Image: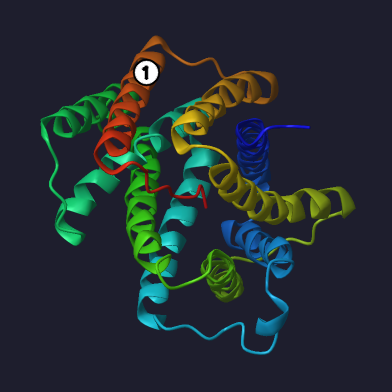
Amino acid sequence: MLSKNQLGFLYMFISVCAFSIMDLIVKWSEDYPVGQVLFFRGLCGIIPILFLIPQDRYFDFYTTRRPFLHIKRCLAGLIAIVAIFIALRNLPLATVVSITFAAPIFTTIFSIFLLKEKVGVYRWIAVLVGFLGIIIISEPGYTALNKFYIYPIIFCLGLSYVAITIRQLSSTEPVWLIGLFFSISILVMSIFSIFIQQWIMPNLKDLFLLSMVGILGGLANLWLTQSYKYSEVSLVTPLKYLALVFAIIFGYIFWEEIPTVKTLIGSLLVVVSSIIIFRREIYLKGSVPTSNHE
């Protein structure tokens, strides 16, 4: 029989695995339009959430006290997910994952302006260290490749705002409703993309893989939530950095991508930065606001 902390570790581990495999499939799906992949992310992402709706909410599951905040959360999430899909298709897997670890940096900055939080010297130092890591990874310049580095940064900005809105929504809204509205928004947006990009009829194997983008994304978010439910946040959150290890392995196996020394150094700085922010949140508040991968 597993203890609560062991269950938390297990849920976090399988959540990281699911997100990593989802990223792998998104990168593999470059022959399909982004909108079509988003369609499967939205449609199949609803499936795991359906099992969480309480019986007494079957007929009014859509009711909410804060519709406009849901809209802002969904818009920020849509920007983030489109950006990360584009980044995964055009940059090495490990590079994208490394930059996404910078999301807590932007969350810290947003919390100052949106939540009126006070940020001390330690977190400001962490923010500067994180930005230095991003600069080292992206090697700012004007080459054709470098323009794609803006997309994982856009993802971080979007995800950071999502973290702020989820923190506000979670005081009155159930987690399943927040996730359901987001999956529906992805589905609706993706359908409109038919008029922009011509969709491709997938074969059975590709249909299965595309469906797994949504199912894995939905399950991974649920497992992430369960992890924080059973175990202390400070114990399980460091496991999220296993995603970088998986990204390096998958990138090498499937695309022969080998991270450069600059990528590894920059990644280390970003990880250290997010850990400092994370530890200060624990010290000052006793808990950490967490955001999902999307």
Q: Residue furthest right?
A: 204
| Colour mapping | rainbow
How busy is the neighbourhood of tag 1: few (under 14 within 10 Å), some, or many (20 plus)? Answer: some
The residue that mark 1 highlights is: 268
Question: Does residue 95 appear in the picture of this structure?
Answer: yes
Q: Is residue 23 above or below residue 77?
A: above
At x 26% / y 29%, what residue is drawn?
A: 130
Q: Amino acid at mark 1?
A: Leu
Q: Position of residue 193 (x, y in %)?
A: 56, 70
Q: Is residue 7 above or below residue 197?
A: above
At x 63% / y 40%, what residue is drawn?
A: 15
Q: Is residue 130 above or below residue 35?
A: above
Q: Position of residue 69 (x, y in %)?
A: 36, 74
Q: Residue furthest bottom?
A: 59
Given residues 210 and 277, the one toward you in this image is 277
Question: Does residue 92 appear in the picture of this structure?
Answer: no
Q: Secondary structure at mark 1?
A: helix
At x 48% / y 47%, what residue is drawn?
A: 84
Q: On the picture, is 284 further left or further right than 242?
A: left
